[in-house]
């Protein structure tokens, strides 16, 4: 409720209005009284000013409080994952990604000077996962966005022989053609999935959904992401916390989150797919 009484010279104006906000909107009452010895033409002008104020307040009252709160909550949550815009179509996005994958200089670098170094670093990562009981030699493993296959070579080198990678451009025998937004595999195919290209996903929820679809119950997914550094010009999203990942992995529990140094990516996030989809999500077991 709001009451305004003002006097100016011979003009006396009283304004009373109240707003009641509820789940279905709001209602408002308003009374305006003008007493004046001023010329008649001034009264409509002053009255119109207060009527305009009334209309604005009435429109504001039509948005229920719970909607404003929900909107604020959604904005806060989604703020930790920002999608980079600018693609005219999905084909344009794919072509942009292919510009990196098919770059002759990068391909030469990946298959020569970078090869041994990356295989060695990935081997260390995977050996650590084996020691922590998250990967074994009997695991059927997938590397998502494997480029020329260093991750797959590392998996096979440490004894995980049933390993394969997918990328937009195949690289036999280590990498087959596949779009991580629509993996070319059946449901519940793999025991272990690894990726360090989450930032390249134009549709992160589809990226995660395909992992959960192709991962067997009890299977493990390991993502290397950047939470503190800017990613490259081919990235399609920017991630600022693991919160959005936890929300998107609807059938998995967060097992670990730890700091790593993985070719510009600083955080390792581990999820395990629940054996019972109705089981309540558990909390993080370990954070480093």
Image (cartoon, helix red, strand yellow):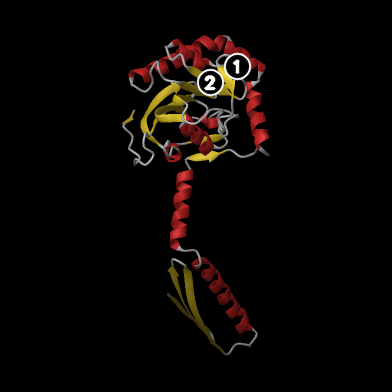
As drawn, 23 above or below 274? below
Left or right: 34 with respect to 87?
A: left
Disc ID at residue 242: none
Residue nearest the observer in this picture, 210 or 246 = 210
Question: Where is residue 180 drawn, in percent x and y?
Answer: 55, 30
Question: Where is residue 205 drawn, in percent x and y?
Answer: 51, 38
Residue nearest the observer in this picture, 49 or 109 = 109
Specify the quadrant of the image occupied by residue 191.
top left
Left or right: 9 with respect to 97?
A: left
Specify the quadrant of the image occupied by residue 48.
bottom right
Marks 1,2: beta carbons within 8 A: yes
Question: Where is residue 6 drawn, in percent x and y?
Answer: 49, 80
Residue at the image position 39 percent from the left and 39 percent from the top: 277
- Cα gap from disc 1 to disc 2, whole angstroms: 9 Å
Q: Residues within 10 Å of mark 1 (few under 14, many from 20)?
A: some
SS assignment at label 1: loop
As drawn, 219 above or below 86? above
Residue on which disc 1 sits = 171
Residue on which disc 2 sits = 165
As drawn, 286 above or below 76? above
Mark toward the start of the polypeptide (1 vs 2): 2
Q: Quadrant of the N terminus?
A: bottom left
Question: Where is residue 51 drawn, in percent x and y?
Answer: 57, 76
Q: Residues within 10 Å of mark 2 (few under 14, many from 20)?
A: many
SS assignment at label 2: strand
Q: Residue furthest bottom?
A: 37
């Amino acid at each position: 409720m709001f009451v305004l009484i003002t006097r100016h010279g011979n003009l006396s104006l009283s304004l009373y209005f109240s707003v009641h906000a509820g789940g279905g909107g709001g209602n408002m009452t308003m009374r305006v009284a003008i007493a004046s010895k001023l010329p008649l033409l001034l009264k409509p002008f002053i009255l119109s000013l207060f009527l305009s104020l009334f209309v604005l307040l009435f429109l504001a009252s039509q948005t229920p409080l719970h909607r404003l709160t929900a909107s604020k909550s959604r904005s806060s949550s989604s703020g930790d994952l920002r999608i980079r815009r600018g693609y005219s179509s999905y084909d344009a996005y794919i072509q942009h990604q292919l510009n990196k994958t098919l770059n002759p200089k990068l391909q030469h670098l990946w298959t020569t000077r970078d090869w041994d170094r990356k295989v060695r670093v990935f081997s260390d990562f995977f050996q650590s996962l084996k020691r922590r009981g998250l990967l074994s030699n009997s695991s059927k493993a997938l590397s998502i966005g494997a480029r020329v296959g260093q991750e797959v070579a590392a998996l096979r080198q440490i004894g995980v022989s049933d390993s394969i990678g997918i990328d937009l451009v195949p690289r036999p025998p280590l990498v087959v053609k596949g779009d991580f937004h629509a993996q070319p595999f059946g449901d519940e195919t793999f025991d272990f999935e690894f990726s360090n290209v989450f930032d390249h996903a134009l549709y992160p929820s589809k990226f995660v959904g395909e992992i959960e679809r192709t991962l067997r119950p009890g299977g493990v997914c390991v993502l290397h992401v950047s939470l503190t550094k800017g990613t490259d010009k081919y990235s399609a999203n920017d991630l600022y916390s693991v919160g959005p990942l936890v929300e998107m992995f609807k059938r998995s529990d967060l097992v670990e989150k730890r700091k790593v140094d993985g070719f510009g990516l600083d955080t390792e996030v581990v999820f395990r797919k629940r054996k019972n989809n109705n089981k309540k999500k558990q909390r993080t077991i370990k954070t480093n």
